[in-house]
Image (tube, coloured by chain):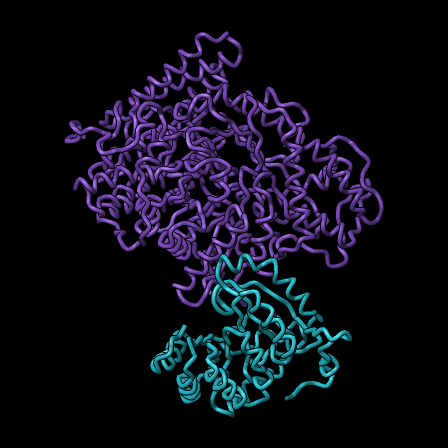
Chain colours: A cyan, B purple
Amino acid sequence: MNVRPRDAVATATRRGDGVPTGAVHSWDVSVGVDGPGTRFVAFLAGCPLRCRYCHSPDTWYRRSGRHRTVDELMAEIEPYRRFIAVAGGGVTISGGEPLMQPRFTGEVLRRCHDLGLHTALDTSGFLGVRADDALLDATDLVLLDVKSWDPATYRRVTRTGSVTPTLRFGRRLADRGTPIWVRFVLVPGLTDAEENVAGVADFVAGLSTVQRVEVLPFHRLGAHKYAELGLTFPLAQTAPPTPELVARVRGQFAERGLTVT
Amino acid sequence: MTGTAHLDPWRGFTGDAWRDTVDVAAFVRDNHEPYTGDASFLTGPTCRTLEVWGTLKSMFVEERRRGVYDIDAATPSTITAHAPGYIDRERELIVGLQTDAPLRRAIMPNGGLRMVETALKAYGYPADPQVHRIFTTYRRTHNDAVFDAYPADVLAARRSHVITGLPDAYGRGRIIGDYRRVALYGVDRLVAERKALKAALDDRPSTDEVIRDREELAEQIRALGELAQMAASYGYDIAGPATTGREAIQWLYFAYLAATKEQNGAAMSLGRTAGFVDVYLRRDLAEGRLTEMDAQELVDDVVIKLRIVRFLRTPEYDQLFSGDPTWVTEALGGMGADGRPLVTRTSFRYLQTLYNLGPAPEPNLTVLWSPRLPVGFKRFCAQVSLDTSAIQYENDDLIRPAYDDDTAIACCVSAMRVGRDMQFFGARANLAKALLYAINGGRDEITGEQVAPATAPVGGETLDYAEVLAAYERTLDWLAETYVDALNVIHHQHDRYAYERLEMALHDHPVRRFMATGIAGLSVAVDSLAAIRYGRVKVLRDDTGLAIDYVVEGEPPTYGNNDERADAIAVWLTETFAAKLRRQRTYRDAELTMSVLTITSNVVYGKHTGNTPDGRRAGEPFAPGANPMNGRDTHGLVAAALSVAKLPYDAARDGISLTSTVTPDGLGHTRDERIDNLAGVLDGYTDAGGFHLNVNVLDRATLVDAMAHPERYPQLTVRVSGYAVNFVRLTREQQEDVVSRTFHGSL
């Protein structure tokens, strides 16, 4: 963990009356990009990692979110329930890293699940140990971001942390039968080494509940957010991967029998 | 045609209701067979189709360069004025052109001579002296007649652009003849029907109304005669009903063609023809007369014709409406009143033309959507949207109960029962500018001129919501009265001087009439009111006290985020103005309806409107139709769509338009997923009561490249408010507007 001290102020996750609150950065309704179908996506604030390619540095700190009770977030979801039911889709808790706030995340997932909404958790798995069984029981799908296999690469990507917790979390999900969509962000010169991809692919191929692998080509569309925050975008000079490179990496997953999108 | 004369035209058809009375809807109901499968039966283009289309494609290059390909400046168009014309006489299956050559435009001075002569001058053609003499000396035009009768306050409102786009200088359009009648019954039967209707008026006293009806019926009978004569010039006898699919398409097209020879209508919809044509094609296929490839080829051939409908208009008109629109709108799909889908193989065949001929804005293919439509059809529509962006969607579950299951769309979003309803098209009033008039005591914010009646301006340094609202209501009362007054003048004179003889011959008598008003600037007005109510809006005034700019403080909600605070204001404004309009007396007692639709005139409306209290700068385009303002809908397409879906259709029965642009990635990762997700969004939006959705599936890079290299994208189609346009034919300004409009891509 490499949480900045000032974030610790915001780690109190309960109001005086015991109602869990969360730091919510924003929400959106997206189609087909954060799990299946049309989804209400809550972006929670705060993340332990500082990925070089991160396109939402504005969600790194808990203080960048607004404190919301579970009821308040559920009230935001409510106007979309009918639409989601008709169009097909669900609710995704994303971030930031939603497992920075496991109690709040777990409660929202459970409430949604009780309403019959399909639920997804979008996580790096780095804090997977914080997801208790009750939370996972209320989770229909985990979007698991496996950033790299090679430990040195993982550290270089995230500037902190190790892949071990993610691997452990992945195996736990597979053991308990939770469906997984693996995400792998392809960055030229950073995550594209053949052995690095092969390691991720081998590991993922061994998880029985993986339904698909999304190879996400790196883009620079979040660069303006760095500028607004007065930060330097570390990959400002990195070009998106070529179609050939994307095809190669997708192939590496596909040849292990994985469904790649 | 040879070889079909011996056939009984109605062989194999079932049902009786349509035999004794002219009732195509009953015929379709009795003979239609739903198709619930997928698109796998469709065939590609034949060589013949590609050759005919190829001939035109090379002419389009020249047309785009010069603005028009050619004009016949000396022959005022009538149904029979021009000799037969062909694209490629040997190869065409369905024949008939508006003039004696493809893309050669006709003049129609009945609507207005000035429009004709301005257009001729703009394209370098001399005005014909004889035409000029006839229409200045012997024959008055609609345009002259309207300006003789406009009162002063209408002229002032028109000049200041608080009311704009009025059809007072050209054909009003938006009337859809039931062209199918000619195919099902033949011209003789329709003439006999009109004669009986006219004879029935003989016993009535000769009041203004009865005299007008008799004269109109006489004109309709004459027009039907001219239609038969025009068909004869192409070698067809259409006195009797069509006997085959090819004849049915040909008869139907002749009827439509005659309408386009007679009227330079702002929108010349085709109607709802696919289900009707399907009955004939199905019979031919069963009789072994056609193969699937032949059936598709016939559809491709008539669609080629519909793609080259042309009217001579001024460059300013084209600038207002983007390119060269004709709105040859065809309504596809929908559900029957009996619960069966009205989807047929021919619905698929019409959509397939977008592959066989490539994407194009015309005909304006409009899918009447219901979540209950067969999955195969829904998926094919979504696929066509993804591939071409060339179709629009309207809510069949709203239209069917409000009208019926044989309803078509005029222009973009105006529903009318085919052959039973007509409308008096009324362009739109600028509600954002009206708000500025309310604040400024009726003075125009740009010129300072007193346009609306003088009232006390809204005072103070900060705008007070209650005070603004009271002033706004007063201004809207004046606007509603002035606006409908203008429309009454226009349509009275249009009926007298540019009557749609043939189109009205293909309607029931008596016909139900709508007075179709419209509003522009909804989202600007709503966001302004929300800013005044939920934020603080400071006023900056010039030396004369005129409010000319506003400073917004706080974080007021904006329309387009499914935020009840702003959306409730949008509902209130829509209902309030509709109610004020309905209180006005209308010409021929037409039922008043209202649309929230701007087409692309949102750019021009914005140009003529000063700074607004929502922070929008003077001259900045409005959002099109019922769209949220560009960039203010921050929660994505679905949240924006749900805001728009709250606008009540009952208050805006002439349609509510939403244009959305998504990137392919914003709909999913795989093609199959994108298709399913788009179909799901359409289900969700329709279920929520959303009326209309234009779907553009594009990426920004494509549009930017098309601006730089128009020659590489001759067929790039973009849907704007209510219809599709060729992107490369938009003005630079409109292209920039489209590009800057929110791309709902995920970042």
* Most foreground residue, B732 or B123: B732
In depth, the one of B429 and A70 nearer the eye is A70
- Residue in the image at 35% along x and 50% along y: B354
Quadrant (top left/top right/bottom left/bottom right) for the C terminus of chain B:
bottom right
Report whether residue B121 is seen. Answer: no
**Which residue lies at the image location 59% right of the left edge and 24% below the top edge?**
B586
Q: Quadrant location of residue B131?
A: top left
Q: Name the quarter where the N terminus of chain B is drawn.
A: top left
- Count of numbered badges drawn on the protein: 0
Quarter where residue B245 is shown: top left
Q: Nearer the viewer, residue B153 or B474?
A: B474
Give how far across and how far down residue B387 sits, in percent. Answer: 39, 56
- Residue A151: x, y in percent? 51, 92
Is residue A109 positioned above or below B723 on the image?
Answer: below
Question: Could one spot residue A102 in this view of the protein?
Answer: yes
- The image position of residue B248, as x and y in percent, is 27, 33
Q: Which residue in the rendered view is the most extreme toward the right?
A: B460
Q: Is residue A116 left or right of residue B28?
A: right
Can you say whether B77 is above or below B380 in the image? above
In the displayed structure image, the side of residue B143 where residue B306 appears, left or right: left
Query: x and y percent of residue B497 in the render?
Result: 49, 20
